[in-house]
């Protein structure tokens, strides 16, 4: 079995897939795309992933897209170190949580990410170049045009942060119900993997507003201690490692 992963080091969706590959100890050829340079929008890449986003998995020539779909696919084709409960009710619960993660924290983290880390790059572009770049994005055109070159207004930031806070509270309730330490109980599942990058991102951006939720604190420590965590978050995977200007932005906010 040969796996090739088209992804980006700092991409939260890519981090989900790298975590599962690493946890299953699967060797993979990593193709790193520079999303700010538009590598995800080239005609060749769009043939693989018409959404113009990462990650994309090539498994012996079969192309699989969308991070939650890829993690489920990997767990189906490689059975060892399973992330999926056997019981169909528990499996349905896991999938419902994965949908929740895709609906709530995954889009919400984009707002602080773009405002704090990516905006300087877009501000340095001419208006024409920025609009052309936004227009070329199959999935994120409206998102980019709404952000514009001045960034999302405070109101949008506040809404995104509120959605993230509600995510941590939901995690806290799920862990309480399941008995923890993971969302579904004693075994880690794909639902944990789905939310992991949102917490890592917000921690990196100095917005870890779950410290009053001890179950979530314990969960975060547990995922950081998982053997797949360090190989997934190799140097350059955190925004503060990739964008040195962020240190000053975060210091000014503190
Ligand atoms: N639902 C997709 C979303 C993928 C996605 O939004 N990827 C981001 C990085 S995390 C991306 O490639 N963005 C490129 C862009 O905005 O042009 C998934 O989970 O794979």
Image (tube, grey):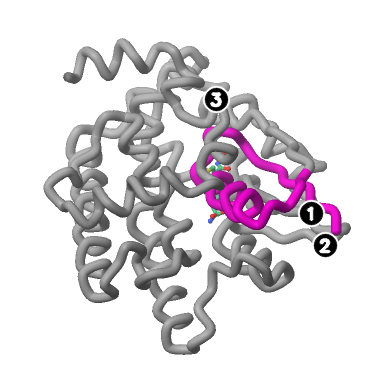
The number of discs equals 3
Mark 1 element type: strand
Closer to the observer: label 2 or label 3? 3
Q: In the image, what residue occupies the spot 26% across and 57% down?
A: 167
Determine whether, in the image, residue 106 is placed left or right of residue 214.
right
Image quadrant where one finds the C terminus: top left
Q: Are marks 1 and 2 in contact (CB under 8 Å)?
A: yes
Mark 3 element type: loop
Q: Nearer the viewer, residue 225 or 15?
A: 225
Q: Position of residue 215 (x, y in %)?
A: 22, 57
> Range of the magenta residues?
1-28
In this rendering, the answer to whether 211 lies above or below 247 is: below
Q: In the image, what residue occupies the spot 24% across and 41% down?
A: 156
For disc 3, the marked residue is 236
Q: Nearer the viewer, residue 192 or 33?
A: 192
Closer to the observer: label 3 or label 1? 3
Q: Position of residue 82 (x, y in %)?
A: 59, 69
Q: Is 14 colored magenta in this rendering?
A: yes
Q: CA distance from mark 1 to mark 2?
A: 5 Å
Image quadrant of residue 224? Answer: top left
Q: Position of residue 220 (x, y in %)?
A: 33, 48
């Amino acid at each position: 079995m040969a796996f090739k992963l088209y992804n980006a080091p700092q991409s939260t969706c890519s981090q989900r897939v790298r975590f599962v590959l690493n946890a299953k100890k699967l060797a993979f050829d990593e193709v790193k795309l520079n999303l700010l340079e538009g590598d995800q929008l080239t005609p060749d890449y769009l043939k693989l992933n018409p959404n113009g986003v990462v990650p994309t998995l090539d498994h012996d020539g079969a192309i699989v897209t969308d991070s939650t779909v890829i993690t489920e696919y990997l767990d189906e084709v490689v059975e060892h170190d399973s992330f999926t409960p056997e019981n169909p009710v528990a499996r349905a619960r896991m999938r419902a949580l994965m949908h929740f993660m895709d609906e709530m924290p995954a889009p919400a983290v984009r707002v602080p990410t773009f405002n704090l880390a990516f905006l300087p790059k877009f501000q340095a572009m001419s208006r024409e170049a920025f609009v052309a770049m936004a227009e070329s994005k199959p999935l994120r055109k409206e998102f980019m045009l709404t952000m514009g070159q001045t960034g999302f207004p405070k109101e949008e930031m506040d809404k995104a942060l509120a959605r993230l806070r509600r995510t941590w509270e939901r995690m806290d309730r799920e862990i309480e119900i399941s008995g923890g330490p993971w969302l579904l109980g004693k075994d880690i599942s794909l639902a944990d993997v789905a939310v992991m990058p949102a917490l890592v991102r917000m921690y990196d951006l100095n917005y870890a507003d779950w410290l009053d939720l001890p179950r979530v604190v314990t969960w975060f420590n547990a995922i950081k201690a998982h053997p797949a965590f360090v190989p997934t978050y190799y140097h350059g995977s955190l925004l503060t490692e990739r964008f040195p200007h962020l240190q000053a932005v975060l210091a000014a906010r503190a």
